[in-house]
């Protein structure tokens, strides 16, 4: 009898992880813990503790990544390995759950897309290395995307903050520097 309980729990864990991968794949831009929690809890698809356990299990398995925004909120995104797993196993998620997520995602995707027109995130690589990505988009077209490595969390936060608050000015400065006529040599 205990074997069937273990198998059922394993199947439930696998299904919950696939639901999370499916949700993140559909959101395209990634989602904060708050976005994910609201969508799944309000619609009774998963409880909070299961969600957190499964989400961090997916991170450990390198199927989901996490990065930090300027406000130091965590944003979760599906990795290429996560997409491969989902591609092979998405059909095992009950059709009713997939349809429910599809219906609920449109308004959330719109809000996230709007929030993602100007982005600045950082990912700690180690205690002394932080990968920062700053981007600006318009109508799903990337205007600029900058990736830099910095040596401190403070610098990473400052770059993100400056980009979020002054992206138009910084973008103009970068374009001016790149298009400036320069002499040979």
Image (spheres, helix red, strand yellow):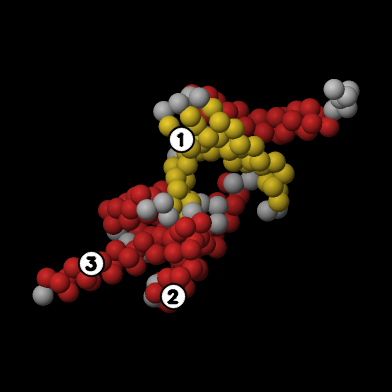
The image's mark for residue 88 is none
Rounded to the nearest angstrom, the CA distance separating label 1 from label 3 is 34 Å
Earlier-in-chain disc, 1 versus 3: 3
* The one of 112 and 151 positioned closer to us in this rendering: 151
Residue that mark 1 sits on: 125
Left or right of 14 on screen, residue 163: right
Secondary element at image label 3: helix
- Residue 34 seen from this side: no
Left or right of 34 on screen, residue 110: right
Residue that mark 3 sits on: 9
Q: Are marks 2 and 1 in contact (CB under 8 Å)?
A: no
Left or right of 181 on screen, residue 148: left
Query: Residue at 37% across / 53% down in the picture?
Result: 61
Secondary element at image label 1: strand
Rounded to the nearest angstrom, the CA distance separating label 3 from label 2 is 19 Å
Secondary element at image label 2: helix
Q: Nearer the viewer, mark 2 or mark 1?
A: 1
């Amino acid at each position: 009898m205990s074997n069937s309980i273990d198998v059922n729990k394993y199947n439930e864990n696998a299904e919950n992880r696939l639901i999370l991968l499916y949700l993140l794949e559909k959101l395209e831009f990634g989602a904060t813990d708050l976005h994910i929690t609201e969508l799944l809890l309000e619609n009774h698809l998963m409880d909070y503790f299961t969600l957190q356990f499964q989400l961090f299990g997916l991170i450990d398995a390198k199927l989901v990544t996490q990065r930090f925004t300027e406000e130091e909120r965590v944003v979760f995104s599906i990795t290429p390995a996560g997409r491969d797993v989902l591609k092979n196993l998405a059909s095992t998620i009950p059709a009713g759950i997939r349809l429910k997520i599809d219906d609920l995602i449109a308004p959330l995707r719109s809000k996230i897309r709007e929030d993602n027109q100007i982005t600045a995130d950082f990912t700690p690589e180690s205690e002394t290395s932080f990968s920062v990505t700053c981007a600006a988009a318009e109508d799903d077209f990337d205007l600029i995307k900058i990736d830099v490595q910095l040596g401190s969390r403070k610098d990473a936060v400052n770059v993100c903050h400056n980009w979020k608050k002054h992206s138009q000015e910084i973008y103009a400065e970068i374009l001016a520097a790149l298009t400036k006529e320069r002499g040979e040599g």
